[in-house]
């Protein structure tokens, strides 16, 4: 017995909403835990820095590669990567740390762009074959403004407080 496309679409969206809710709850718990256990968090971060320096002294290329990959995965998952950026800067110094973070962000943005385009090609704009979003008045208005003033629109999107993974998709 085949599942109807509308039921499949609702199941896909239900899983996405459940995953988003799980991420929000996990992030909230992490923030609350961090607020109440700031001393333990500071101690853990210092231990992480010490361990990262030890690993970087043993095999710097491997740790650098892992740092770049970790930054890129965090970008794709829309998780703030500031702690990893600071850690890479602390371990490798200002310029090499900046270069590693930059490579990770470029890789993460490229992966986000590829995933977004691939999903759009496969499933249409809303993620499940529908074109309701394409017919939306707001999306059409944004598309007109983007065609008329591409640089201004690009600058405003870059300046907006939106995760990088969303900024590169459209």
Image (cartoon, rainbow, N blue to C red):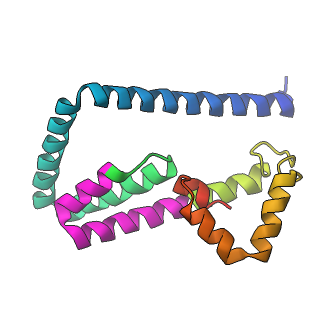
Q: Measuring 26% from the left and 66% from the top, which residue is drawn there?
A: 97
Judge whether residue 66 can be spotted in this image. Answer: no
Main secondary structure type of the part rendered in magenta: helix
Q: Is residue 80 magenta-colored?
A: no
Residue 126 spot, x, y in % from top left: 77, 46
- Left or right? Give the position of 25 relative to 38: right
Residue 104 spot, x, y in % from top left: 40, 62
Q: Quadrant of the C terminus?
A: bottom right
Tell which of 40 and 61 is nearer to you. 40
Q: Which residues are magenta?
A: 83-111
Q: Measuring 61% from the left and 63% from the top, which residue is drawn there?
A: 157
Q: Is residue 106 magenta-colored?
A: yes
- Left or right? Give the position of 126 relative to 112: right
Judge whether residue 117 can be spotted in this image. Answer: yes
Relative vertical location of residue 38 with respect to residue 98 in this rendering, above or below: above
Q: Quadrant of the N terminus?
A: top right
Outermost residue to the top = 1
Q: Quadrant of residue 42?
A: top left
Relative vertical location of residue 107 with respect to residue 2 in this rendering, above or below: below
Q: Quadrant of residue 161?
A: bottom right
Q: Measuring 31% from the left and 57% from the top, which residue is drawn there?
A: 85
Q: Measuring 11% from the left and 48% from the top, which residue is drawn there?
A: 50
How many numbered marks appear? 0
Residue 28 spot, x, y in % from top left: 43, 29
- Left or right? Give the position of 30 relative to 106: left
Residue 22 spot, x, y in % from top left: 52, 28
């Amino acid at each position: 017995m085949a599942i109807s496309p509308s039921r499949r679409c609702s199941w896909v969206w239900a899983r996405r909403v459940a995953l988003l809710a799980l991420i929000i709850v996990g992030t909230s718990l992490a923030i609350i835990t961090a607020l109440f256990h700031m001393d333990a968090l500071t101690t853990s971060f210092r231990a992480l820095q010490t361990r990262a320096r030890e690993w970087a002294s043993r095999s710097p290329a491997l740790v650098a590669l892992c740092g770049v990959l970790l930054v890129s995965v965090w970008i794709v998952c829309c998780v703030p990567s500031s702690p990893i950026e600071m850690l890479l800067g602390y371990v490798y110094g200002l310029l090499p740390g900046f270069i590693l973070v930059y490579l990770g962000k470029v890789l993460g943005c490229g992966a986000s762009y590829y995933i977004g385009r691939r999903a759009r090609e496969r499933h249409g704009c809303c993620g499940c074959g529908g074109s309701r979003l394409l017919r939306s008045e707001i999306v059409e208005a944004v598309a007109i403004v983007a065609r008329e003033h591409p640089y201004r629109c690009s600058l405003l999107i870059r300046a907006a407080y939106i995760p990088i993974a969303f900024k590169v998709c459209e």
